[in-house]
């Protein structure tokens, strides 16, 4: 079942322009679930909204502690492929912090260029490589994978950004987060459009 949160919808409509102006301090509040239809497919014109949601997600995820030898090291957001989205994320994250750590955005054309990061966004142009990416990251702790394609979460990605008519929603694969030793707030889980695995232990389209 795809679920909609009206409170989150209003937040997203406000957050995207507010993020650009540097005044985001949104508080996510759950609202009653109502049915909603998906749009046909992703569009680059909504990258600012997606980047805004990506930043807000960092407020509700707890990563493993930073290296004690480098407690002030940057919080790195990596983007594999999809240069336009990478640039939008870079603009959205500029000057912001995650739990006191400055944010650095890195772009990777392929996995050979990969450097450690806390979030890895898998661009649509690299989506076919998701099984390879997940195999590459197997055993790596503290990396939240994010993507946009329809089966991203079902194939083992952590968070899928979902285009809906009135906002950008998200799906969460709880097993992927657990394997990466990430703690997701109960509030974030309530706001998800969909949680995987499903209650019966299976995943469904």
Image (cartoon, rainbow, N blue to C red):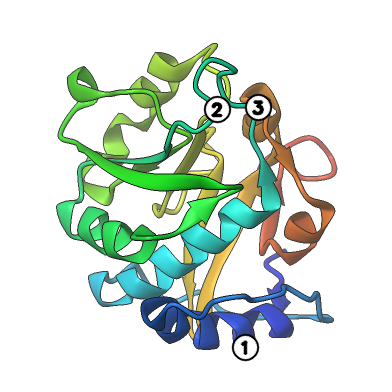
Residue depth check, mark 1 versus mark 3: number of the one nearer the observer: 3
Q: Secondary structure at mark 3?
A: loop
Report the Cα–Cα distance between label 1 and label 2: 35 Å
Residue 9 is situated, as x and y percent measured from the top left of the image, at 61, 83
Q: Is there any visible trace of residue 83 in the rendered image?
A: yes
Counting residues from the N terminus, which is met first, the one under dot 2 or under dot 3?
3
| Left or right, residue 59 beside residue 129 | right
Q: Identify the residue at image location x=44%, y=23%.
A: 134
Residue 4 is situated, as x and y percent measured from the top left of the image, at 69, 76
| Left or right, residue 178 beside residue 46 | right
Q: Secondary structure at mark 1?
A: helix
Residue 37 position by quadrant: bottom right
Q: Quadrant of the N terminus?
A: bottom right
Which residue position is annotated with label 1? 10
Which residue position is annotated with label 2? 71
* 57, 67: nearer the viewer: 67
Tell me: residue 53, above or below residue 137.
Answer: below
Residue depth check, mark 2 versus mark 3: number of the one nearer the observer: 2
Report the Cα–Cα distance between label 2 and label 3: 12 Å
Is the residue marked by circle 3 packed among few (<14), some (14-19), or many (20+) residues within 10 Å?
Answer: some
Counting residues from the N terminus, which is met first, the one under dot 1 or under dot 2?
1
Which residue position is annotated with label 3? 64
Report the Cα–Cα distance between label 1 and label 3: 31 Å
Q: Identify the residue at image location x=61%, y=25%.
A: 180
Question: Mark 3 and mark 1 in contact (Cβ < 8 Å)?
Answer: no
Tell me: residue 156, above or below residue 26.
Answer: above
Q: Which mark is residue 148?
A: none
Q: Identify the residue at image location x=68%, y=25%.
A: 181
Q: Is there any visible trace of residue 166 in the rendered image?
A: no
Counting residues from the N terminus, which is met first, the one under dot 1 or under dot 3?
1
């Amino acid at each position: 079942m795809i679920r909609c949160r009206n409170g989150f919808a209003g937040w997203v409509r406000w957050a995207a322009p507010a993020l650009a102006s540097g005044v985001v301090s949104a508080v996510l509040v759950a609202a009653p679930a109502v049915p909603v239809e998906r749009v046909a497919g992703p569009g680059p014109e909504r990258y600012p909204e997606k980047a805004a949601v990506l930043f807000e997600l960092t407020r509700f995820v707890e990563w493993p502690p930073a290296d004690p030898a480098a407690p002030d090291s940057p919080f790195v957001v990596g983007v594999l492929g999809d240069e336009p989205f990478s640039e939008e994320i870079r603009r959205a994250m500029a000057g912001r912090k995650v739990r006191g750590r400055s944010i650095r955005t890195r772009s990777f054309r392929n996995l050979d260029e990969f450097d450690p990061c806390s979030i890895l966004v898998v661009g649509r142009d690299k989506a076919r490589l998701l099984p390879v990416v997940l195999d590459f990251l197997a055993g790596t702790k503290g990396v939240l994978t994010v993507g946009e394609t329809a089966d991203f979460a079902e194939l083992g990605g952590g968070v899928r950004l979902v285009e809906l008519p009135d906002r950008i929603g998200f799906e969460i694969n709880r097993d992927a987060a657990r394997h990466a030793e990430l703690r997701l707030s109960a509030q974030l889980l309530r706001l998800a459009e969909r949680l995987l695995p499903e209650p019966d232990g299976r995943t469904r389209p």
